[in-house]
Image (cartoon, grey):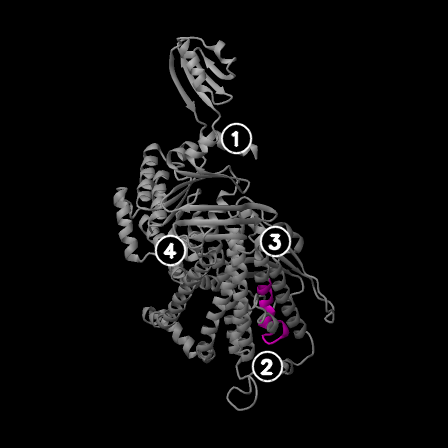
Amino acid sequence: MHKLWLIIKREYLTRVKKKSFIIVTLLTPLGFALLMFFSGFMASGKMNSIKQVAVVDDGGILQNNPLEGSQMKFTVVNKGIDEMKSEYVNDGYDVLLHLDKIDNLNETKVNVNYYTDDKMSFFTIESLENKLSKAIKAYKLNHSTIDKEVLAGLETEVTLENGLKDGEGIGDNSSKMASGIAQALGYIMGFMMYMVIFIFGGMVMRSVMEEKINRIVEVMISSVKPFQLMLGKVIGVGLVGLTQLIIWIVLIGVAMMIIPGLMMSSMDSNTVEMAKEIQNNPETANAVSGLIVELKNQNWLLIIPVFIIYFLGGYFIYSSLFAAVGSAIGDDLGEGQQLMMPIVIPVILAIVMLSSVMTDPDGPIAVFGSMFPLFSPILMPARLPFDPPMWQVIVSILLLIGCVILFVWIAGRIYRVGIFLYGKKVSFKELTKWMFYKG
Amino acid sequence: MNQQDSNMVLSLDNVVKRYHNHLAVDHVSLDLPRGQIFGLLGPNGAGKTSLIRIINAITGADEGHVYFEGKPLSSDHVSEIGYMPEERGLYKKMKVGEQLMYLAQLKGLTKQQSQENLKYWLERFDIKSWWNKKIEELSKGMQQKIQFIATVVHKPKLLILDEPFSGLDPINTNLIKDEIYELNKQGTTVIFSTHRMEQVEEICEDIALINKGKMILIGSVAQIKEDYKENKYRLVTNRDITQYLEPAGVQIESQKENDYIVKFSDYNSNAFLSNLINDDIKIISFNEILPSINEIFIKKVNEN
């Protein structure tokens, strides 16, 4: 036991004391913030260039129904299409659209030709089609006998609200907002597990290979049992991961408390004005406060500890497999690729299942995936914000623990043979044989 | 073999180790008395490393028994054994001090004991200033010294050294050799595995020769040489003696003027010499040529 402790301590301290660890631990949340900011910025479209679109409008369709778009600037030109076809590039346009006259208002199919210098993306074409179809619809409406007020009265916006939210009754009482947040949280936790498995599992594998290549392993094995060495490494690296995770949770928690205050105090009058506007706008204010309320409503006291259990369980299963593979491949990483397949495939499958789990968090795929121990570390945390039945969580955790013991044992059997083998290409058949060697 | 015989540091009793269909260690028995320097010889792939791993309790024997000081060998004994593998290895990124403290504590020493023992060794090798250097900053020879200290820091009763001098310059070889003698004087039993036969003859009292997993020769160096001698002598005279040789049944192995290497068919050297003396031939030198361990080694391995 004492020796295991010494090994864990060394594996932990040598990593935590590294400068790179400190930098990564502190910078990753910052990187995430930047990434979120950046993707928000990208989504807002401010980064894209604005396309200049010239429109030859033979039928005057756009006269009362101008086209508008954030990514495109439309200009109706009073020239013939044949002339424009040869001139639009020189005139500084990126795209030329040609709307023919519409003779028959009952025609439901209209073809619009476009000419462009660059290839247009699928999304641009779709968005143009939408805009044109709206404009043509409005044009047709203007020329029809339908009463516009009656038509406007037909437009109905439906908001689905949970009836149980404030009242009494049977069923789930979360709001639409809560579902959105649950989904976002589910994705975040699922992907975090995915990263944990590959980053820390890979760390264990590299470290096993290093010891084998260094030949220190023979010295170590004359003092400790191979299983102790492997377990010490897996636990030590796992604690590094846990340390990092806890620092991140704390950092994010602190940031969430401090940053809004900081932002308020450092804002100039202009942004304060904007912030006030947002607060005064009842819809956005509701959304923001709703978000905060829903985030606070999440059952963090359940989610965080259960997430940590899956974090450790998933980590132990996969990192012990990585350790076994690391011991078998030795100095040739290329050779190890095929041995890594059985580790990579279940993780990828779990990620593929993640989206269907998110759309139907209590469906058969979700239930199976969050029980099966090779998938559950990724899929059960993703289900947690959706309040899965407690018995499923408990059964899944028990299966996970059983699987951890089994896999650590199997990996230990492979490891103790693998670390002494040099210059031999190892097949799966051989690995299974190693499991049953005695001594 | 007596299980209670605690004069034997190590006893192997019909030890067998199999890998797949191949016998790596084939019914090897061995008694190693306390305080010996024992040479373990054998060509590559003979089963030396397999045997050493069994003695180190790294792997178990498939058949047979291993006793350490009269008790069945268990993993508790690893703190009594020091093992320096042929392929040296240290954590390259670790500092000398950290590394040695770690390995010493893994051998079961307390932190304080480790510090004391390390202080002794680092002072002895005059390398105290290396404490905060990383292993990768040291030369290969320097790393070997650290490796040696790591092997002996816990004062093992049994020291297993696999090619301890490979990669060392003559000065460091002597330094380590002296330390081995010193430890041996203090009561440490040493198993010394090497291909360098001249070192075996110089250092070891008893040797064992292993080939294809079998122990094919065991005994003291002097006795083995005596057993394998071939009645060869070097004879130097003041004139040609070829005419005397054939009638006496003496074969010439080689000749350089009056310097002969001869082989007697039976033990009649005295009669032959008195013959020469009677004819007033001056005998400048006459000595027996004992086979080197190297020759015996090659002969035995080829016989097998």
> Which residue carries the number 4 mark?
B106
Horizontal and vertical percent for residue B281? 40, 9
Question: Marks 4/1: CA distance?
Answer: 43 Å
Q: Which is more foreground, mark 4 or mark 1?
A: 1
Is A315 on the left or on the right of A247, as rendered? right
Q: Which is more foreground, mark 3 or mark 4?
A: 4
Visible residue check, residue B205:
yes
- Region in magenta: A349-365
Q: Amino acid at mark 3?
A: Phe
Which quarter of the figure has residue B257? Answer: top left
Q: Chain of mark 4?
A: B
Q: Are marks 2 and 1 in contact (CB under 8 Å)?
A: no
> Which residue carries the number 3 mark?
A428
Number of marks in the rendered image: 4
Q: Chain of mark 3?
A: A
Which residue is located at x 29 percent, y 55 percent?
B113
Q: Earlier in the sequence, mark 4 or mark 1?
A: 4
Question: Marks 3/1: CA distance?
Answer: 43 Å
Residue B299 tag number = 1
Q: Please name whichever residue, B155 or A53, is drawn nearer the observer in this view of the structure.
A: B155
User: Does the segment drawn in magenta span residue A356?
Assistant: yes
Q: Are marks 3 and 2 on the same chain?
A: yes
Is A426 on the left or on the right of B136, as rendered? right
Which quarter of the figure has residue A325? Answer: bottom right
Which residue is located at x 31 percent, y 50 percent?
B97
Q: Amino acid at mark 4?
A: Leu
Q: Which is more foreground, mark 2 or mark 4?
A: 4
